[in-house]
């Protein structure tokens, strides 16, 4: 079983080891610890024997461009409790199914770090604040879920021991196990003053656009969008008169339409909403009492009288039962009428007719209609299909490619189609052979250091207790992202299983207007799920092709990312990196990534994932079977609950003007991520 878990770490500056101050208060992003080191060591004879450039500084600069990094520095590079089958293949070796040597996970400490999406002025946008809040909530939620799991196990153990014996008073098995970790998490958010908007707001809420999807009622509560986890109507009560002197209170501010009332009628733009109260609340949707004109009902009536807009949220069952109900904000409505009538069950109910205000973005709620388009039922139904499966049968679930941008539409070739200039204008003539790999391959001739085997954990019946699980202990006695039935098995298998649960998962690669190809999922992805591993050819970073500009290289740089996070630094004081994880004995703060994963000419779907300044994925290094952090694997995890068809993205973490091409010129690429806090430049 896998539990959706919180985003721990942050994106952006948080994950970069250091932010260089530009002197104007704006922190500058780094390209890489390694490059920084190279720059600061101009006198050091870095060995580029085959490089005709004499000047070491120029070499360094050129090298920067050669290694167009997709740094993992801005990510939460925790080593998550996931098992890696690390049988890395020789380049071109036939790809075979995953192997499991039965080794276990090594998890390494990470801290809990909040998100830090900052605008150029250093202020967080409302969107980033919402994201922060939801990630913090999910962090609490995960811990509460884990606590419940443990309590459940304990209760089960108690039940077994007391079975058959006289159940004396005081020895009775634990009853009333709470199944509401969400409510516990809300409580913790309240106790830590982490609720975003504590004052109830009339009308729209900053950072929540129409179409925003909440993945639970609790998420709405912690943002301050709807302050009650159960009631349909949230209203400002009479006690708040001081804060709302111009209104007759109560006034309703938001309603949730979730099909809980048998009398509701929902025609999307026009809604007949049944007032609150008198419902049996047991999910049978029956009225068992008369409703009374007070509280939320009176609030809606007062909205009508005072023309106060009401936010409307619709709850609908997600296509994925793994995610459950999803709540979509559908915009502002006005209450245009109300009346009392005898409902279907014979009790008095109040009816409120609401009409959607004109001029708002189109409604997005429907069982199959989502923000960015319609989810197809099958591959053959996809609009703009240009390739049925870019993996050519290698992935269990085909990955189609769609192109609604080009005319005529073309399929992805794997060739870098976006920037012919980087090939001196010769991109069209380049012979290109892109191979889809599902597993890491070794570059030809690459000698790997001898890896020490990882003992793994000895948990039986699942890794439940982070205080006893050896993997969790290495992670600061915490399961950072997902709970696995057991920290064993193959990484690739587990990633798929973890993400997709019982569901059939589906991704596609799609052509974007300005970023080349991108990736999205047709299924909702719960926060904290592993999404995909960065696959390509494992190389030595200093053996990358110096003539090519390669934007598909990922440095394996666990330490850098770990060091860069506040929370992680905090945590590292408690849980230092075990000495056996790095047999080099290097000073870790100064160590530079020795290996990288190059997905330029071969890789999996992850190579198509674009950058965003406000991403929904983050990067973690994962260790398994061995404890050598230089050879950790790179896995992208969901930072948020990701709705279907939302483009997947992570923060590449390039510093502006940090990449120089082989021609010595600074590379500039505008960022088209579209995030409210976009930094405008990818490079
Ligand atoms: C690893 S590739 C990502 C896949 C790429 N879109 C493709 O079609 O192969 C990285 C390159 O994609 C483009 N890209 C990624 N994110 C972008 C963004 N937010 N804005 C503009 N270009 C982006 C840049 O050219 C970048 O160098």
Image (spheres, rainbow, N blue to C red):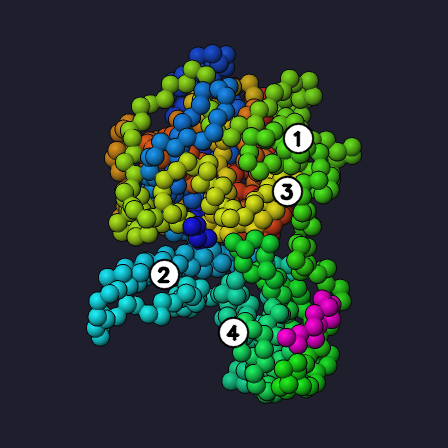
Using the rendered view, name the quadrant where residue 260 is placed. Answer: bottom right
Q: Is mark 3 within 8 Å of ligand 1?
A: yes
Percent position (x, y) of residue 488? 36, 40
Q: CA distance from mark 3 to mark 2?
A: 42 Å
Which numbered disc flags the more N-terminal residue, 2 or 1?
Answer: 2
Q: CA distance from mark 2 to mark 1?
A: 46 Å
Q: Residue at x 68, y 47 (%)?
A: 376
For label 4, the residue is 282
Using the rendered view, name the quadrant where residue 36 is placed. Answer: top left
Q: Which of labels 2 and 1 is toward the front?
A: 2
Of 171 and 35, the residue lying toward us:
171
For label 3, the residue is 672
Secondary structure at badge 3 equals loop
Q: Is residue 160 above or below residue 339?
A: above
Q: CA distance from mark 1 to mark 3?
A: 19 Å
Which numbered disc flags the more N-terminal residue, 4 or 2?
Answer: 2
Using residue 526 as the reference point, say whether residue 521 is left or right of it: right
For label 1, the residue is 412
Using the rendered view, name the quadrant where residue 209 is placed. Answer: bottom right
Q: CA distance from mark 4 to mark 2?
A: 22 Å
View extreme (right): residue: 407
Secondary structure at badge 2 equals helix
Q: Which of labels 4 and 2 is toward the front?
A: 4
Q: Is mark 1 within 8 Å of ligand 1?
A: yes
Residue 388 visible in the picture: yes
Residue neighbourhood size for the residue with mark 3, other residues' Cα within 10 Å, grouped as few (<14), some (14–19), many (≥20)? some
Percent position (x, y) of residue 354? 71, 75
Magenta segment boundaries in residue numbering? 262-273
Q: Residue at x 64, y 85 (%)?
A: 346
Q: Which of labels 1 and 3 is toward the front?
A: 1
For label 2, the residue is 148
View extreme (front): residue: 164
């Amino acid at each position: 079983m896998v539990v959706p878990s919180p985003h721990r770490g942050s994106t952006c500056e948080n994950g970069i080891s250091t932010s260089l101050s530009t002197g104007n208060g704006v922190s500058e992003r780094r390209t890489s610890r390694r490059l920084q080191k190279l720059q600061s060591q101009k006198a050091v004879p870095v060995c580029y024997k085959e490089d005709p450039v004499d000047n070491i500084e120029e070499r360094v600069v050129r090298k920067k461009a050669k290694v167009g990094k997709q740094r993992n520095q801005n990510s939460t590079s925790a080593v998550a409790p996931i098992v890696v089958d690390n049988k890395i293949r020789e380049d071109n070796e036939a790809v075979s199914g995953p192997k499991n040597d039965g080794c276990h996970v090594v998890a390494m400490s990470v801290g809990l770090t909040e998100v830090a999406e900052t605008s150029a002025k250093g202020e967080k946008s409302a969107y980033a604040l919402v994201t922060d809040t939801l990630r913090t909530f999910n962090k609490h939620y995960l811990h509460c879920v884990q606590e419940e799991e443990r309590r459940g196990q304990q209760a089960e153990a108690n039940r077994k021991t007391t079975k058959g014996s006289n159940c004396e008073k005081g020895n009775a098995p634990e009853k009333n196990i709470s199944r509401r970790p969400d409510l516990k998490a809300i409580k913790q958010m309240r106790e830590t003053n982490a609720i975003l908007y504590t004052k109830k707001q009339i009308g729209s809420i900053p950072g929540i656009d129409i179409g925003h999807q909440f993945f639970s009622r609790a998420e709405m509560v912690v943002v301050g969008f709807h302050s009650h986890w159960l009631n349909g109507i949230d209203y400002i009560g009479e006690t708040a008169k001081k804060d709302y002197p111009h209104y007759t209170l109560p006034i309703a501010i938001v309603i949730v339409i979730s099909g809980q009332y048998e009398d509701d009628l929902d025609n999307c733009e026009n809604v007949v909403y049944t007032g609150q109260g008198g419902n049996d609340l047991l999910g049978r949707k029956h009225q068992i009492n008369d409703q009374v004109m007070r509280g939320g009902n009176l609030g809606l009536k007062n909205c009508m009288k005072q023309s106060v807009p009401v936010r409307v949220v619709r709850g609908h069952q997600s296509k994925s039962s793994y995610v459950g109900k999803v709540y979509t904000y559908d915009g502002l409505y006005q209450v245009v009428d109300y009346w009392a009538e005898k409902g279907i069950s014979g009790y008095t109910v109040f009816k409120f007719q609401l009409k959607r205000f004109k001029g708002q973005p189109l409604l997005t709620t429907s069982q199959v209609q989502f923000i960015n388009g319609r989810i197809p039922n099958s591959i053959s139904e996809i609009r703009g299909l240009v390739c049925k499966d870019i993996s050519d049968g290698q992935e269990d679930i085909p990955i189609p490619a769609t192109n609604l941008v080009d005319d005529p539409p073309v399929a992805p070739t794997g060739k870098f189609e976006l920037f012919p200039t980087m090939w001196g204008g010769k991109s069209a003539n380049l012979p290109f052979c892109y191979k889809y790999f599902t597993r890491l391959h070794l570059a030809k001739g690459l000698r790997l250091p001898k890896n020490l085997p990882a003992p793994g954990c000895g948990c039986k019946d699942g890794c439940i207790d982070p205080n006893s699980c050896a993997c969790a202990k290495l992670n600061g006695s915490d399961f950072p992202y997902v709970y696995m039935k057991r920290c064993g098995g193959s990484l690739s298998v587990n990633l798929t299983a973890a993400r997709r649960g019982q569901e059939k998962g589906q991704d596609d690669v799609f052509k974007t207007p300005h970023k080349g190809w991108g990736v999205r999922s047709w299924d909702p992805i719960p926060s904290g799920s592993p999404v995909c591993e960065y696959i390509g050819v494992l190389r030595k970073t200093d053996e990358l092709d110096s003539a090519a500009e390669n934007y598909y290289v990922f440095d394996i740089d666990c330490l850098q990312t770990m060091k860069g996070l506040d929370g992680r630094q905090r945590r590292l004081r408690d849980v230092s990196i075990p000495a056996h994880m790095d047999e080099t004995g290097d000073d870790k703060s100064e160590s530079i990534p020795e290996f990288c994963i190059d997905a330029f000419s071969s890789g999996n779907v992850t190579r198509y994932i674009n950058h965003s300044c406000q991403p929904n994925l983050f990067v973690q290094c994962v260790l398994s079977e061995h404890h050598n952090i230089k050879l950790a694997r790179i896995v992208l995890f969901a930072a948020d609950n990701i709705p279907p068809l939302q483009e997947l993205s992570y923060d590449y973490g390039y510093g502006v003007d940090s990449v120089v091409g082989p021609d010595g010129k600074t590379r500039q690429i505008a960022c088209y991520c579209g995030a409210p806090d976009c930094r405008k430049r990818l490079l």
